[in-house]
Image (spheres, rainbow, N blue to C red):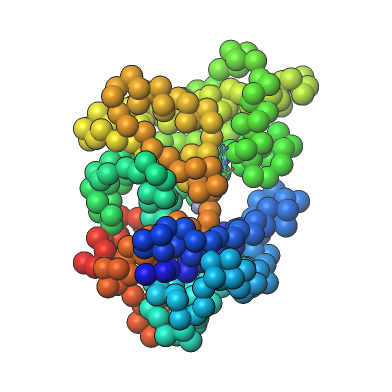
Amino acid sequence: MKVLGIETSCDETGIAIYDEHQGLLAEALFSQIPLHAEYGGVVPELASRDHVRRIIPLIQQVMQHASCQAQDIGGIAYTSGPGLMGALMVGAAVGRSLAWTWGCPSIGVHHMEGHLLAPMLEQNKPQFPFLALLVSGGHTLLVDVSAMGQYRIIGESLDDAVGEAFDKTAKMLGLAYPGGPVISKLALEGIPGRYKFPRPMVNRPGLDMSFSGLKTFVLNTWNESDQTAQTKADIAYAFEDAVVDTLNIKCKRALKATGHQRLVIAGGVSANQRLRTRLTELANSSSIELFYPQAQFCTDNGVMIAYAGLQRLIAGEHDGSGFSTTPRWPLDELRAPGS
Ligand code: KG4
Ligand code: ZN
C-alpha cells in the first residue's frame, strides 16, 4: 500500500508518499520560518493561510516525483492533532476530501506518534519495547512504549516544552527563530564553565521536568551582564548545557525505573548535537541502545505521518464519512492499531 502523508499541524507543510514495501518514494517540505521570523514565533492565522497556499502544489509535486497516479494511492494520512486548530483543519480537509475523490481510505494521525515512530524510517530501527524521550516545540515527554499505540507517559514538562524554552531564550537574547539551531550554533563559541545554570527538578525524585525557571535565569543573567557577543555565546552554552544535562539525568532515571534497554529520542530538539552526544555517552556507559531519526526527520515532516498512518491503515483503521481535528490530544489516549 502507498500512503500519502500530510503534515500541517504548525509551521511546516510536509507531504510524502511512503510505500509499505519500498519505503519512502518522495517527499516535500515547505517551511514557513521566514514568514513567522519577524514575530519571533508562529502566528496561527498566517500559518493556516500559508498551508492553504502550499498544500496542493506540494501534493502535485510529490505525486509527480513518485510517478504516482491517484489510483496508486491506497490511503491518505494527515495530522489530526495536537496542533494549531486552523492549521490542522487545512491538512485534514484536504486529506479527507482527496481520499473521498480518489476512493481510498483516510486516517487522522497523532502528531507525536508520528515523531515517536520517526526512528523507524532508519535502516537501524528500534524494536519494541523502548523508552522514548519526545522533545519538540510543544511537548517534552518521557514515554514507556510497549508497542505501537501503547504509550504510558511517565514524565513530562510541567511548564514550557524544551523546544519552546530554546525559542523563548533565543528571543530574549535577540536571536532568530526557531531558537534551537541558533542557540546550539552560538553555544559552540561559548566558554564552558563561565556560567553554571540550575538543572531544574533533578534534586527531587520523579521524572517530571520544568524549563520556564531556566529561561528566567537566562534573562536575569543577560540583563546583569556586559551584554557582549562573547557573553551571549557563554550564556547560550550554559543554557544548552543545563537543558541537555537535565534531560540526560531524567533519561537515566527513567531507564532505571522501566528497565528498558533501548532509548529513542525524537522531535525537533532531538536534532541537537550536544543532546545526541550526551545520550550516546549514557547509552555506551550502560549498554543501552540509542536510536534517533536523521536530522530532517527530527523536525516536522510528512514522512513520519505517512509511516504512522500506514501502520494504522494496514490494521483496518480509517475515517468515517466525516473528519475531525483534535488540537489537544494526550498521547496516551491512543490504542494499538486496529484495536
Ligand atoms: O518537532 P518540531 O519541528 O515541531 C513541533 O512539533 O513542535 O520541533 C520544533 C522545535 C523548535 O522549538 C526548535 O527550536 C527545536 O525544535 N529545535 C532544536 C534544534 N532543531 C530544532 N532545538 C535544539 N537544538 C536543535 N538543533
Ligand atoms: Zn512536531
Residue 324 in the image: x percent, y percent?
43, 75
Residue 252 in the image: x percent, y percent?
33, 27
Residue visible at 76% across and 51% down?
A: 38
Report the front residue among 213 and 101.
101
Residue visible at 65% across and 15% down?
A: 191
- Residue 301 horizontal side relative to residue 261, left or right: right
Kindly tell me whether residue 48 is visible in this rendering.
no
Task: Locate the C terminus and report the quarter of the image it occupies.
Answer: bottom left
Residue visible at 48% across and 39% down?
A: 270
Residue 127 in the image: x percent, y percent?
27, 44
Residue visible at 35% across and 82% down?
A: 320
Q: Residue furthest top?
A: 193
Report the front residue among 134 and 28.
28
Q: How many marks?
A: 0
- Classify residue 248 by image quadrant: top left
Residue 43 in the image: x percent, y percent?
66, 59
274 up-or-down from 37: above or below: above
- Residue 78 horizontal side relative to residue 228, left or right: left
Kindly tell me whether residue 75 is visible in this rendering.
yes
195 up-or-down from 40: above or below: above
- Classify residue 284 by image quadrant: top left
43 up-or-down from 131: above or below: below
Task: Locate the N terminus and report the quarter of the image it occupies.
Answer: bottom left
